[in-house]
Image (tube, rainbow, N blue to C red):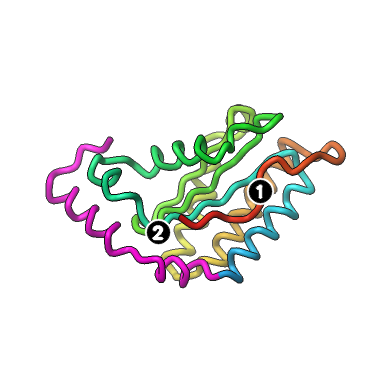
Amino acid sequence: MTHESFGQRCGRVLRHWRSSKADAQRAFPDSTLEAVAQAITAGEQTHRGEVRFIVEKSLPTDEVWDGVTNRQRALALFADYGVWDTEDNCGVLIYVNLAEHKVDIVADRGIDRKIDAATWQAVCRTMTEGFRQGNYRDATLAAIEQVNTLLRTHFPANGARPNELPDSPIML
């Protein structure tokens, strides 16, 4: 929960309410989502991590009103989509909240022990800086490549393994 004034809370609700599905589709058209899926699939061939990418046009109004933060929402989605449920505890969620222009990365405990928060924040900045310029596709693909490089460094592939989580992005 955040400690927002009534006016701040109302402004936040309005920002989320005005965020449309069409805005999300312009930022992440099918061609971009397919490129994201391909980048995740290719990266997972080189490391033991499992990457999920979720874009949400806006939070549900009740969650905005209750002051749910971007990080809290990312943690909830990490659980809801089973990103934590991988054999090597190597799941990573990249969560994009379009209404707030924020990105959060949640890494499972196996990864969290080796990659610090500052490193993840740098990956998030790659995306948010690109998003500010309207460059959603390239910024997202660059961030996924950074995630793949980190996972390849700390969790290199060790032979064939099953794909534990779907590679396709989720649009909420």
Q: Position of residue 82 (x, y in %)?
A: 57, 36
Residue found at x 21% / y 37%: 3
Type of amino acid under label 2: Lys
Q: Quadrant of the C terminus?
A: bottom left
Q: Which residue has dot 2 on it? A: 57
| Dominant SS type (magenta) | helix
Question: What residue sits 53% from the left and 70% below the top?
Answer: 29
Instruction: Please name the residue shown 44% across and 65% down the image.
Output: 24
- Tell me where residue 159 appears, x and y as whole percent: 87, 39
Q: Is residue 162 magenta?
A: no
**Magenta span:** 1-29
Residue shown at 62%/32% (left/top)? 85
Quarter of the rendering occupied by the N terminus: top left
Q: Does 172 sit left or right of 69 as displayed?
A: right
Picture quadrant of residue 34? bottom right
* Mark sitting earlier along the chain (2/1): 2
| Label 1 sits on residue | 166
47 to 43, vertically: above or below: above
Q: Quadrant of residue 48?
A: top right
